[in-house]
């Protein structure tokens, strides 16, 4: 016996049959079916295999709280694993595969795990998998295969995702009775409302329990409310989940424009992320039913009572033909009537409460046996799932045949968003659950989410919340009166009740608390026995509530058991933290269109086209893209870099340095300001002269370096690293506004105003002479001139270690200057060079670089720069430089390293194998005119260890090189090649 | 504002402000910059427990 489609009823369009495939098998459903309802209608019972024990599982629920029926839906770049079958609506051509089983769902070899179950309870991995790193590599292969639920797709995501912002006066989350009433009141009062609903249709519980509201069909009323909201300038979003409630009443909504795996229509995105800033928020998020604890409560055929009812009323599916109901709430009696009216046999209603008399109970008892004081012991299972139920009633064991057990362990208000917004909770004894209390932001819970029972109460509660929210948000129109349902005792069935305990003699090892992570009642007790007694420990030790369903049906059940072991009451029990998203969200949605090339802003230099024309190999440098090298046909990158660097050493080279940070500082106090920012003296610089400088952070560590040039009497040009340009901009602004606000000067960021190139090498002077209309400047001097009819500034400074000139021109005029110098350089036998060659040159010369040596942990003394410090002090960072720790002996300091061959960059420096590292190789290069490897490094004790032999080791690359500590310059230490 | 370390601070004052500063739970005065927008500096009073922004002062003129 199994499920079947009812001949009439349901909110389906039976004129639109839809074909889909699951595990390759063809099925047919109707428009309006979820994957779960369509499969149940065809008598499918087996929907998945559990995570650890590979137990056969069926569908438990009808909503997003479903823990068992997980499928991978879609193909190739649209494949979405771990999709709840209850949360995807069938579409033509849908393809789904079951998960966590091999080779098939029916015959799953993973089921052998059940024989190991005594050895693999919760937390077993903390007590096993011992034995060194080699054994771990063996374990790891099995663990990786066993871990996780679904498989991720291998192809790139084929979908596009959009992100939008929206604002409203009242955001209503949930379009069930309370949410609709709230939206109704707010819209009537003139507020701009955004109403969001995760289902495909508005109505919530009204889709299951039909009602008449304000004289008409409830679903018609729902459509009217929607129209009212839209007419008032608001929005109604279906298939949209409010995923997170963030600071200052910002909520993120995840809208599905098509179902998982479905190809969107035309160029539309598949999903849209809304960032909504609301003045007030009404959370009408409903309540989720809890299961009961008994042996075999995970057997296919055990379902939540409200879900059974939803399948009957909304999807016209009777999930079983002989039904037993186990409950502690009155709500389950509605399910009893629903299955009876659908033609099923109701074997028994097992109510755990002492005898209750009400209209509903009497109606059901007239048609089926109702037993009070009953505790379920176990579900009996056969090949296809549930075959019977056993319970203790008034001390006696009773057994009933059935193929479907509808359980109702009470209802838990969905307080997730309220808690994310920083709200409080209060334990409601009657519900056996926590209800939201004091909000911290602009939220208000309403309806079942606030613990209300019955349609009339929920409508009124929602209406009150909506009216109040509209008023608080500044819409003071008349909200009208609360909508009234046509009175029916069924609609007022209470959701109160709880039943957390287990009957005497129940097998705790098969009484499941968390179905998705296979956590049993025995595991919860085990955690408590082993001392894991806080709810945080319980969660992490057993993994209860940590699966993709985030414990929607299990958190409170586990907590209640823990609390009972502790001898406390639930009112005293804390919960774990609620975190967004409410339901799983694809990363693509969070990325939006900032993917691929658009993941970060792209900044191209003014000479980008020219470099492209010369077939440059590119290097991202922060947000900029710079040439790494200009390889000739057939040349590898290292070969190109070596050729280019050697050209600079022997003849000449030209490189683009446009992206360097540049600032013009002008005014009477310009020099004073620079002496606050830079740690070297500046004021003594004569007009037309420049010098190397560096800057510190407040804690005394070097943060950047560069050069400063006195262009005019009260005008300076400051250059610093490309990567630190944005940081330096903020730094200068901070010093200007906060530390030296009384100085008279102005600072202009001219990084993108001036483009620049460096011409370096023994032949550089001659080449420049031929292009410039003036005598090339002497070392560390700046002049103005003209090249190719463009006014330029020429600075004489050397980074490469050869005589070099930096030529600056306005960015929009740089191209003719570049062309002239480029042609002249290459005509003279020189070459264009890129960042790779620049590295080789500066390392051999011994210049430190931001990122490598200047890594935020070095003082000027560590880098051999202390003789350049301004003796007057007063610069940023001076105070902390005097700290004893920064003056201590034995600090890691800059050294040079030599070896016969290449030295691995990033390698650790040790005295002998097995010793602790005493430093590392910060920049590695080669001797450009000669043989061997050279490098810069940071070593404890610094140059005091000159001559010492060390090992540079990189275990991850399997490299070990003998190096000798040397002075940190390997080429022309005196600077004879460029000094005048 | 306590977080701004003057250029002429002593070493002891600098160490105190950088490494052993109080971190009160509740209202706190902070310096913010609108980095991706107008780059103005803002004096903000924020509650460190609730993230509520209690007061905002635009330091004029922006630079």
Image (tube, rainbow, N blue to C red):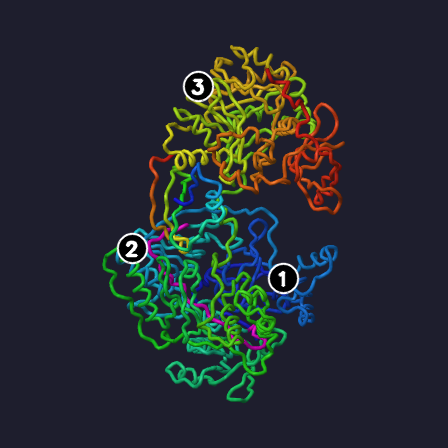
Q: Residues within 10 Å of mark 1 (few under 14, many from 20)?
A: many
SS at badge 3:
strand
**Is any atom of residue A736 visible in this view?**
yes
Q: Earlier in the sequence, mark 1 or mark 2?
A: 1
Name the residue beneath numbered marker 3: A712
Q: Is residue A542 above or below residue A941?
A: below
Q: Is residue B55 above or below residue A879?
A: below
Chain containing mark 3: A
Inspect the magenta stretch and tell me whether residue A50 lies in it: no
Tell me: B28 left or right of A499: left
The lab-note entry on whether marks 1 and 2 share a chain reads: yes
Q: Residues within 10 Å of mark 3 (few under 14, many from 20)?
A: few
Instruction: Give the position of the N terminus of chain A as an image quadrant.
Output: bottom right
Name the residue beneath numbered marker 2: A473
Distance between mark 1 and mark 2 Cα atoms: 49 Å
Give the number of the mark in front: 2 or 3. Answer: 3
Instruction: Give the position of the C terminus of chain A as an image quadrant.
Output: top right
Name the residue beneath numbered marker 1: A100
Tell me: A26 left or right of A878: right
User: Which range of residues does the magenta coloring cover?
Assistant: A275-301
Q: Earlier in the sequence, mark 2 or mark 3?
A: 2
Measuring from the top left, give residue A545's x and y in whole percent.
53, 65
When asked about the image quadrant of residue A868, the answer is top right
């Amino acid at each position: 016996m199994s499920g079947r489609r009812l001949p009439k009823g349901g909110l389906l369009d039976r004129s639109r049959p839809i074909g889909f495939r699951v595990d390759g098998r063809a099925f047919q459903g109707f428009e309006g079916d979820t994957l779960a309802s369509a499969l149940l209608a065809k008598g499918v019972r087996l929907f998945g295999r559990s995570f650890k024990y590979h137990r056969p599982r069926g569908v438990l629920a009808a909503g997003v709280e479903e823990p068992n029926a997980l499928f991978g839906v879609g193909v190739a770049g649209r494949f979405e694993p771990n999709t709840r079958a209850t949360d995807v609506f069938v579409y033509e051509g849908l393809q789904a595969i079951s998960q966590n089983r091999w080779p098939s769902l029916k015959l799953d070899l993973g089921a052998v795990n059940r024989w190991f179950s005594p050895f693999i309870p919760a937390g077993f991995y903390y007590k096993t998998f011992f034995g060194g790193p080699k054994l771990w590599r063996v374990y790891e292969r099995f663990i990786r295969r066993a871990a996780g639920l679904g498989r991720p797709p291998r192809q790139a995501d084929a979908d596009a995702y959009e992100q939008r912002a929206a604002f409203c006066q009242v955001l209503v989350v949930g379009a069930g009775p309370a949410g609709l009433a709230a939206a109704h009141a707010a819209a009537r009062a003139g507020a701009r409302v955004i109403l969001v609903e995760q289902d495909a249709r508005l109505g919530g519980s009204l889709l299951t329990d039909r009602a008449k509201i304000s004289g008409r069909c409830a679903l018609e009323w729902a459509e009217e409310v929607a129209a009212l909201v839209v007419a008032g300038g608001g929005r109604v979003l279906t298939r949209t989940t409010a995923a997170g409630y963030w600071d200052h009443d910002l909520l993120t909504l995840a809208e599905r424009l098509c179902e998982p795996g479905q190809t969107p229509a035309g160029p539309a995105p598949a999903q849209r992320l809304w960032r909504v800033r609301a003045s007030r928020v009404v959370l009408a998020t409903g309540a989720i039913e809890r299961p009961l604890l008994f042996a075999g409560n995970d057997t296919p055929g055990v379902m939540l009572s409200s879900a059974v009812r939803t399948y009957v009323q909304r999807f016209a599916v009777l999930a079983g033909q002989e039904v037993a109901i186990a409950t502690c709430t009155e709500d389950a009696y509605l399910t009893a009537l629903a299955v009876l009216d659908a033609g099923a046999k109701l074997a028994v209603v097992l109510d755990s409460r002492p005898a209750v008399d009400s209209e509903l109970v009497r109606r059901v008892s007239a048609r089926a046996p109702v037993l009070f004081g009953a505790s379920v012991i176990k579900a009996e299972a056969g090949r296809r799932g549930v075959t019977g139920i056993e319970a203790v009633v008034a001390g006696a064991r009773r057994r009933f045949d059935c193929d479907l057990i509808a359980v109702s362990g009470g209802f838990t208000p969905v307080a997730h968003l309220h808690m994310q917004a920083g709200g409080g909770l209060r334990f409601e004894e009657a519900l056996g659950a926590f209800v939201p209390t004091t909000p911290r932001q602009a939220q208000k819970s309403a309806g079942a989410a606030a613990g209300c029972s019955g349609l009339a109460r929920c409508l009124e509660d929602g209406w009150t919340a909506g009216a109040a929210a509209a008023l608080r948000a500044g819409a003071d129109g008349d909200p009208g009166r609360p909508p009234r349902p046509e009175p029916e005792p069924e609609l007022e069935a209470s959701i109160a009740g709880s039943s957390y305990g287990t009957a005497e003699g129940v097998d705790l090892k098969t009484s499941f608390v968390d179905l998705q992570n296979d956590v049993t009642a025995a595991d919860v007790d085990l955690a408590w026995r082993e001392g894991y007694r806080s709810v945080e420990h319980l969660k992490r030790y057993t993994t209860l509530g940590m699966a993709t369903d985030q414990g929607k049906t299990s958190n409170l059940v586990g907590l209640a058991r823990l609390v009972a072991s502790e001898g406390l009451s639930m009112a005293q029990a804390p919960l774990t933290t609620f975190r967004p998203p409410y339901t799983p969200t694809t990363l693509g949605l969070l990325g939006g269109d900032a993917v691929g090339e658009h993941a970060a802003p792209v900044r191209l230099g003014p000479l980008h086209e020219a470099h492209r024309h010369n077939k440059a190999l590119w290097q991202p440098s922060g947000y900029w893209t710079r040439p790494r090298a200009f390889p000739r046909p057939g040349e590898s990158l290292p070969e190109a870099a070596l050729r280019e660097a050697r050209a600079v050493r022997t003849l000449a080279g030209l490189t683009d340095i446009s992206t360097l940070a540049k600032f013009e500082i002008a005014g009477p106090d310009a020099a004073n300001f620079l002496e606050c920012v830079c740690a070297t003296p500046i004021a003594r610089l004569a007009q037309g002269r420049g010098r190397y400088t560096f800057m510190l952070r407040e804690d005394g560590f070097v943060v950047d370096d560069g050069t400063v040039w006195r262009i005019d009497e009260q005008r300076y040009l400051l250059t610093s690293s490309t990567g630190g340009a944005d940081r330096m901009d903020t730094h200068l602004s901070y010093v200007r506004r906060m530390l030296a606000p009384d100085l008279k000067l102005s600072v202009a960021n001219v990084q993108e105003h001036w483009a620049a190139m460096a011409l370096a090498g023994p032949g550089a002077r001659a080449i420049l002479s031929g292009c410039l209309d003036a005598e090339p400047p002497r070392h560390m001097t700046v002049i103005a001139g003209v090249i190719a009819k463009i006014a330029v500034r020429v600075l004489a400074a050397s980074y490469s270690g050869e005589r070099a000139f930096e030529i600056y021109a306005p960015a929009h005029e740089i191209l003719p200057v570049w062309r002239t110098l480029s042609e002249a350089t290459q005509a003279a036998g020189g070459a264009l060079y890129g960042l790779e060659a620049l590295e080789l040159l500066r390392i051999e010369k011994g210049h430190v670089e931001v990122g490598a040596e200047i890594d935020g942990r070095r003082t000027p003394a560590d880098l051999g720069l202390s003789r350049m410090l301004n003796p007057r002090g007063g610069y940023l960072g001076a105070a902390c430089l005097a700290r004893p720790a920064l003056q201590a002996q034995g600090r890691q300091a800059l050294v040079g390293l030599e070896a016969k061959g290449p030295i691995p960059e990033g390698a650790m420096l040790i005295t002998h194998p097995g010793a602790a590292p005493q430093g590392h190789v910060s920049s590695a290069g080669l001797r450009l005119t000669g043989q061997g490897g050279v490098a810069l490094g940071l070593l404890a004790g610094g140059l005091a260890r000159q001559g010492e032999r060390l090992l540079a080791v990189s275990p991850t690359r399997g490299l070990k090189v003998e190096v000798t500590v040397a002075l940190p310059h390997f080429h022309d230490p005196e600077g004879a090649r460029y000094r005048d | 504002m306590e977080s701004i370390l003057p250029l002429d601070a002593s070493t002891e004052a600098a160490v105190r402000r950088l490494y052993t500063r109080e971190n009160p739970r509740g209202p706190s005065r902070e310096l913010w910059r609108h980095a991706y927008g107008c780059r103005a500096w803002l004096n903000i009073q924020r509650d460190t427990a609730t993230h509520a922004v209690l007061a905002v002062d635009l330091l004029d003129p922006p630079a």
